[in-house]
Amino acid sequence: MSWNYDATNIGKDTASQRLNAVRLLVGDTDTNDQQAQDEEIGFALSETGNNTYLAAAWVARSLAGKYSRQVNTSLNGALSADYSDLAGHYTKLADELEYQGKKVGALLGLKAGGITKSGVEVVRADTNRIEGSFRRDRFKNPPSYQTPEYE
């Protein structure tokens, strides 16, 4: 297992840039307190279609799961570790990152359509095709009005 972070190489173009971006979003940038391995982040990126925000949410949820398994401890009131708070913080972070991932993902990488002008013309030219029930400008006034595309 490996752990790498380079603050000068953050972006969305290459695998290493996406890995660093996910680490930054999750807050896993301290080499002395490593939270997730490169391979785990790589898996999260592959599962989320390289959406760095959704991958960071995935990693944050896995860290919340990790800390939710640990019990809160206290040593004579001098030293304590409250893992339930840590798990809660990662869960909240995951929710916020997931929201951002859906917001950003809706703007990037999604395509709609598939209908071309030439494809529509081919369908309209097909004489064996059943005529549709509705068309644009069907009831436009005056009644004798005909658009060139429907003549």
Image (cartoon, helix red, strand yellow):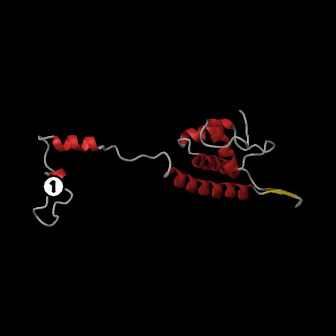
Please identify the quadrant where the N terminus is shown.
Answer: top right
Picture coordinates of residue 38 (x, y %)?
68, 37
Does residue 94 appear left or right of residue 133 in this picture? right
Give the farthest residue toward the left.
144
Would residue 75 be visible to someone looking at this image? no
Q: Nearer the viewer, residue 120 or 90?
A: 120
Picture coordinates of residue 88 (x, y %)?
67, 58
Which residue position holds label 1?
A: 133
Residue appearing at x 16%, y 41% in the figure:
125
Quadrant housing residue 35: top right
Kind of residue at badge 1 = Ser
Quadrant housing residue 126: top left
The local crowd at label 1, few if under 14, some if 14 to 19, many if 20 or more residues have their Cα within 10 Å, is: few
Residue appearing at x 69%, y 40% in the figure:
9
Residue appearing at x 69%, y 45% in the figure:
23
Residue 138 higher or lower than 22, as above or below: below
Give the farthest residue toward the bottom.
141
Quadrant housing residue 128: top left
Picture coordinates of residue 151 (x, y %)?
13, 51
Picture coordinates of residue 29 (x, y %)?
75, 46
Residue appearing at x 26%, y 41% in the figure:
119
Q: Nearer the viewer, residue 99 or 74?
A: 99
The total number of labels drawn is 1
Would residue 73 be visible to someone looking at this image? yes
Does residue 68 appear left or right of residue 79 in this picture? left
Q: Considering the numbered disc 1 on the image, is that residue within a helix, a strand or a loop?
A: loop
